[in-house]
């Protein structure tokens, strides 16, 4: 048997560990018994290694096809998949995404067993594989994937979605977390946990280790005594953070490589100058415009008084609340909220002129010295459609915006709904030191908008440059960041030379709210790799 694992990797700014696992037999489910589901999660220094194991029995008197579906994060990398059938182990081969679809279809048409990873909802991809199992035979599916966790809003989040579809004789979630820097807190919960199941979540925490387990019995999983349905249906969530060190954070060296975690605590926030560029074209009608109003009201209320802000509304025409940025005093925030509450949809979509208007406003305010010298300039664009008024060529718009910004400010883009060209927004944002986020239509769209804003609401440092001794380092990953936001973290990794490591000096240069540069320097004696 040949197993081709086709991995279509999708880029995402989300950083959740998300797994949904269940085995489904499509036509005669009662003839397939899933008797074991195990999730084994190990986190070492923010690097998560997850092993999902599921065992099933074909109880029928004839061979049948059994399906194994797992939802995993879009940022995860599948490193291994294997199946064990009646003592015989078959190991899969992961293919690059460029060849993915073609090889998957070829494998299926030739009768081979193949797995496919494809998009599934907001934050996940679904890995699917099926295999024909002989009568009265067992099959074990083992999927292993890895991911670097990202810190957001002061914590790391591991979200495991479990939907076994039936009570399982052996059900277990086990997580072991090791953080040499020290663990500040660990929380574990699940949306399906009743008062009876809550005590089954066992948690042990020491200075730098945490152990979490959840192992309900077969009867504890049932919705009611004797019921076939299971209460285990939803998200099992682990949240934790590490103890932040003063100065340059944590530097770890393993097997000739180093990793540097930088998230200095207790830094004062840098004031921000933000221009909100809001699409009010006809496609924003209905719930979109209402949810945008709600989100903007909440966001405006969260502005700090030392911040400056402006509002630009656009369809085929560009309208500004005021012609210049305004300090976020109670009076002006109240006036802006009243203005936003009158927001109505109309017209077509002129993204090019709207963003360029925002750039010119910030440039003029900088030129006239109306903004704090040490402050962060940013544009937040919200749109739901394609540009169909004014300049409509996507590459031309991207070039116009990049040329106008000139590396002097950050552009964040929020793509609302299914019709937006997300790749266009993503490229344009990355070209201008920012990021894009897809906002999914639904009752929680306003919460999504507000959540993204909270991630970028409090810049702490600007133009962060992390430097390492040239004679000791062969290669480093990205080591310059336009900004560091409160609750986030910068991670730099690199390969070391065989040179003397007794004087490994790390320096970080950044701009903050104090006069001049905030110069951080760190020197320590580190044993060689």
Image: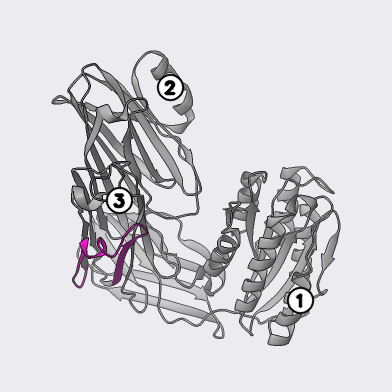
| Side of 380 where 135 appears, left or right | left
Which residue is tagged 1?
338
Eye-nearest disc, 1 or 3: 3
Magenta span of residues? 185-208
Q: Mark 1 and mark 3: span between their CA atoms?
A: 49 Å
Which residue is tagged 2?
103
Please, is residue 242 above or below residue 392 in the view?
Answer: below
Q: Residues within 10 Å of mark 3 (few under 14, many from 20)?
A: some
- Residue 402: x and y in percent read 70, 55
Please, is residue 169 above or below residue 408 in the view?
Answer: above
Q: Is residue 203 located in the magenta-colored stretch of the structure?
A: yes
| Side of 345 where 97 appears, left or right | left
Helix, strand or loop under label 1: helix
Closer to us: 368 or 283: 283
Eye-nearest disc, 1 or 2: 1
Which residue is tagged 3?
223
């Amino acid at each position: 048997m040949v197993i081709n694992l086709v991995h279509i990797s999708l880029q995402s700014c989300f950083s959740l560990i998300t797994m949904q696992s269940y085995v489904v037999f499509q036509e005669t489910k009662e003839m397939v018994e899933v008797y074991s589901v195990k999730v084994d999660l190990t986190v070492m220094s923010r690097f998560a290694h997850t092993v999902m194991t599921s065992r099933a029995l074909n109880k029928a008197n004839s061979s049948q096809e059994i399906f194994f579906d797992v939802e995993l994060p879009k940022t995860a990398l599948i490193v291994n998949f294997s199946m064990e059938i009646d003592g015989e182990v078959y190991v899969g081969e992961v293919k690059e995404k460029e060849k993915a679809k073609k090889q998957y279809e070829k494998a299926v048409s030739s009768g081979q067993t193949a797995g496919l990873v494809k998009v599934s909802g907001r934050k996940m991809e679904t890995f699917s594989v099926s295999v024909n199992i002989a009568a009265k035979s067992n099959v074990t599916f083992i999927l292993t994937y890895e991911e670097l966790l990202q810190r957001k809003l002061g914590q790391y989040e591991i979200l495991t979605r479990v939907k076994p579809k039936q009570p399982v004789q052996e059900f277990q979630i086990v997580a072991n977390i090791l953080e040499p820097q020290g663990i500040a807190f660990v929380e574990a919960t699940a949306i399906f946990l009743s008062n009876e199941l809550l005590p089954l979540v066992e948690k042990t925490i020491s200075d730098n280790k945490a152990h979490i387990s959840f192992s309900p019995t077969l009867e504890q999983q049932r919705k009611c005594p004797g019921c076939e349905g299971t209460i285990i249906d939803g998200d099992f969530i682990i949240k934790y953070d590490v103890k932040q060190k003063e100065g340059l954070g944590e530097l770890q060296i393993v097997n000739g490589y180093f990793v540097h975690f930088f998230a200095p605590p207790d830094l004062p926030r840098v004031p921000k100058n933000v221009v909100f560029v809001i699409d009010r074209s006809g496609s924003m009608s209905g719930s979109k415009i209402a949810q945008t109003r709600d989100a903007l009201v909440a966001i405006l209320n969260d502005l700090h008084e030392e911040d400056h802000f402006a509002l630009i509304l656009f369809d085929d025409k560009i309208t500004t609340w005021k012609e210049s940025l305004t300090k976020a005093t109670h009076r002006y925030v109240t006036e802006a909220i009243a203005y936003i509450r009158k927001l109505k949809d109309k017209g077509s979509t002129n993204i090019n002129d709207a963003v360029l208007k925002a750039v010119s406003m910030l440039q003029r305010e900088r030129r006239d010295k109306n903004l704090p010298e040490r402050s962060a300039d940013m544009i937040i664009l919200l749109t739901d459609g394609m540009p169909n008024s004014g300049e409509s060529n996507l590459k031309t718009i991207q070039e116009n915006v990049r040329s106008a910004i000139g590396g002097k400010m950050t552009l964040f883009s929020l793509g609302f709904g299914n019709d937006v060209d997300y790749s266009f927004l993503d490229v344009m944002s990355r070209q201008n030191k920012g990021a894009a986020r897809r906002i999914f239509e639904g009752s929680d769209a306003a919460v999504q908008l507000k959540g993204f804003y909270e991630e970028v609401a409090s810049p702490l440092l600007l133009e962060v440059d992390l430097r390492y001794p040239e004679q000791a380092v062969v290669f480093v990953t990205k080591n310059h960041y336009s900004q560091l936001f409160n609750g986030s973290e910068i991670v730099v990794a690199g390969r070391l030379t065989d040179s003397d490591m007794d004087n490994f000096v790390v320096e970080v240069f950044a701009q903050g709210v104090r006069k001049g540069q905030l110069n951080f320097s760190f020197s320590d004696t580190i044993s060689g790799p």
